[in-house]
Structure formats: structure tokens, C-alpha cells
Image: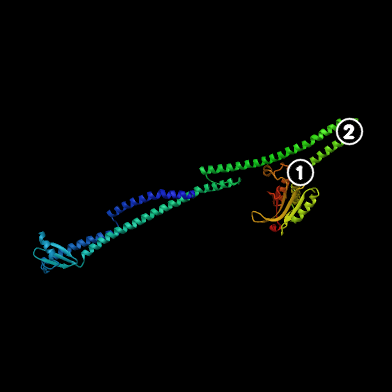
Amino acid sequence: MSLRTRLALVFVAATLVPLGATLWLASILLDQSLRIRPSNQLTTLAESLEKTGREYYRQACDQLRADARAGRLQPVSPDTPALKPLVDEFKASGETERFARDGARLIYLTPENVWEEPLPLNLTQLAEQIATARLTASRDLRRGFFSAWWLLAALIWLFALGLVWWVATRFTRPIVNLTAAMRALAAGNFRIRVDHDQTGEIGLATDAFNQTASELERNRDRLVYLTQLASWQILARKMAHEVKNSLTPIRLTVEEMVARHDDPNTDDRRLFLTQAAGIVTDEIESLERRIRAFSEFSSEPPVCPEPLDLPALVEERIAFLGAAHPEVRYVVETAENTPSALADEDLVKGILVNLLENAAEAAGEGGQILTKVAAVQAPDGASRVAIEVHDSGPGLSDLARKSLFQPTISFKQRGMGLGLSIARKSALLSGGDILLIAGELGGAGFRVILPTLERTT
């Protein structure tokens, strides 16, 4: 759940309970106030009608009394079922006269007689209507007032909720951006920066992040540069060591040649000079070989990819190298429908020469080398073509497997540690790679993966 949603939920939880209590208490107080003093036009009209009805009833009573005393009305029998209860109650009260209403009739009672006269206006019905109007007015007033009150409260609360949501969005957006930038920095993107216009704690945190990212980028660049320098320093120390190893016997041999310059024994001097010349020649050739290896490792030849028939190229390299290793038996296996590779021919030849030479030296006299060419499928599902070289040698140690392709590390007596590094570099330049695999003849196994012509086109 995002921080913005949490802030909104906190606002809802923190405001609903006190808001509900406030509305409940305010509603009770308003209801009591409205019951005590209803004030609207309908209530005022009801009060006026009530006064008018009372005045009309008084005048009607006066008129009935005057008509009865003047003899303009005849008395009615007091023994009728409708009047008898009223007459008995009047006599028992001891009053001198009484007026009563029975629906639309006005009744005048004296101890001697009873008179009645119809009323043009039904006062009972009018009283009921006035009471109903007053109750309706009060109820409508409360209903309308409470509806408006609750609606206003709901609108104010919703506006406050929207304001909180907007503030939470502005508050959390820099945090979301900062979190995303941290994930990118953790993934290795040291160039990530967060733009902001904040001035508070969030702004300080963003500035600290940008400063940290800049510092990490500078440290990374320095580390890469120092690592490169360290690699070249290692190469330089090894080169100096190898050159020194070759120059020492040359110096000693030359010094011995100078010391024996005046040797009277001509035959011994001639034999020594011949041996000394051989030593110097061998050491010079060793120096040339070392310098050539370093030169090949540091050079960046142009890559010219072209369609290659790998089975034919493998057969050609084996025929070329087989004469130098007649004691080794070569076996070539080629799968059907092997696709053509698209790579630089010189680079591929160099890779094959290196792998086949290493395999021949490892296999030794009476050994065997198995070379396989077949189509393979890359992890991304693309079609590739592979060359595998297996030898029957002793195999590779755990230490050799861990540092096999690192330059300046060699596990051969006369090796420079650059052959496999140069070979893998050539494979990478060709769009492929070299992998160490399980050997099928008991020794080491290598797989050269190259792009196919069909994949590129």
C-alpha cells in the first residue's frame, strides 16, 4: 500500500468518529431548538387561523345565547341520545350555562332548556387541520434543515479528503521518485539523478542521494581506471620479468665470450662460440615470441565477417597442424545440415590453431583429439553453430578452470598465458564466445559458439 493511500486512510479514520459525534450532538441540539420555536410562514398562518377560529367560536356562542333568550330559537328535547350524556354532565356540574360543539353543531345549555344551531364552519375539523399544519411545518422545517446540514457537512468532509489526497500526492511524489532512483542505483545505474524543487527534509534527502550517486559514479570510474592500470602493471611486470630472464643468459654468455677471446686453444674457443651463439639465438627467439604474443593480445585487428564453411575450415586446420603432431590421432564429426557461420576467417583460424595446438600438447604421444561441428541453440532461442575440441589429456585442475581465460596466467611450461585470452577475444569480436565444457575423451573440452548466416540475415 502506498504512503499516499495510507495518509488518506489515516485522515478518514481520524475524522469520521469525531465528525459523526459532532453531527449527532449538533442534530439533537438543533432538533430541540426547532421544536421550541418553529418559525416559518406556514406556522404563522396556522396561529392566525387558530386565533380566527377562537374569535368565530366566541361570536357564534354570543349569537346563539342572544337568539335563545329572545325566543328566536325553539329549545330541543334534552332526552335525545346524542344530548342526554351532555345534559346530565351539565346538570351535575352546577354551572348556569355551557356551550359545546358536536361536529358542525353548536349547543347552548341552561338548567331549563337546551338550544342548538348548525355552524357554517366545522371548528373541530379546523382545529385538527391547524394542528396537522403546525406539526407538518415543524417536521418539514427540521427535515429540510437537517438535510442541508448533513449535505453541507458531507461536502466539507469530501473537500477536506480531496485536499488531503492532493497534499499527500505532492508529499509522496518526491519519495516515489527517490525510491525509483534508489532501485536504479542499486541495479548499477550510477548516472541516475533526481530533479526536485523541495526545500524541506525531502529536498535534503534528495540532494544527499544525488551527491551519493555522483560520488559513487566517480569512485566507480576511478576503480575501473585503477583496475585497468593494475592489469597493465601486471602485464608490464611479467613482460619485464620474462625479458630479464632471457637477457640474463645472453649477458652471461657474452661476458664469457669476451673472457675467452684470448684463449689459445682454437678448437675449444670455436666449440664454445658455437654453443654460445646457439644460446643467444634461442633466447632472442624466445624474446621475439613473447613480444609477438603481447603484441597480438593488445592489438585490435579489423573484423571482416563473411560466410564460412566450418567443417571445411576445421579439416584444413587439422591438415595444416597434423604434420607437426604425427603422434596424435584426429577425429572430426560433422552434423548434417550444419549452417554456415558468419565470422572473420582469420580470427576463426587463429581460434582453431590455438585450441588444436593446446589439445595436441595435452594429448601427447598416442593421444586423440575429437573435433565436432554442429548447430546449437543459444539461451535466447537463436540458432548458432558450434565447434567443439576434446582431447584425451589429463584434463584441467580446479585452479586452471577458475582462471583459464585470464591473461598472463599459463599452465604450460613455455606458455605465456595469452593464447586462450586471445582466442576468446577473437570469438567475442566475431559475435560469439568460447566455453569450457566437459571433455568426452577424459581430458579438456572447449566449445566455440559463432553466429550463423541465417540468424544475421
For the point 75% across and 36% down, the residue is 241
For the point 79% across and 42% down, the residue is 289
Q: Is residue 441 above or below residue 47?
A: above
Q: Is residue 200 visible?
A: no
Is 137 left or right of 62, judged from the image as shown?
right
Q: How far separated are the C-alphas under marks 1 and 2? A: 36 Å
Q: Are marks 1 and 2 in contact (CB under 8 Å)?
A: no
Q: Which residue is mark 2?
A: 269
In the depicted view, which residue is nearer to us: 66 or 92?
Answer: 92
Q: Amino acid at mark 1?
A: Ala
Q: Which mark is residue 293?
A: 1
Q: How is the image coloured?
A: rainbow
Residue 136 appears at what percent x and percent y? 29, 60
Is 161 left or right of 387, judged from the image as shown?
left
Q: Earlier in the sequence, mark 1 or mark 2?
A: 2
In the depicted view, which residue is nearer to us: 404 or 157?
Answer: 404
Is 375 left or right of 267, judged from the image as shown?
left
Residue 113 quadrant: bottom left
Residue 335 appears at what percent x and percent y? 71, 57
Quadrant including the C terminus:
bottom right
Residue 269 appears at what percent x and percent y? 89, 33
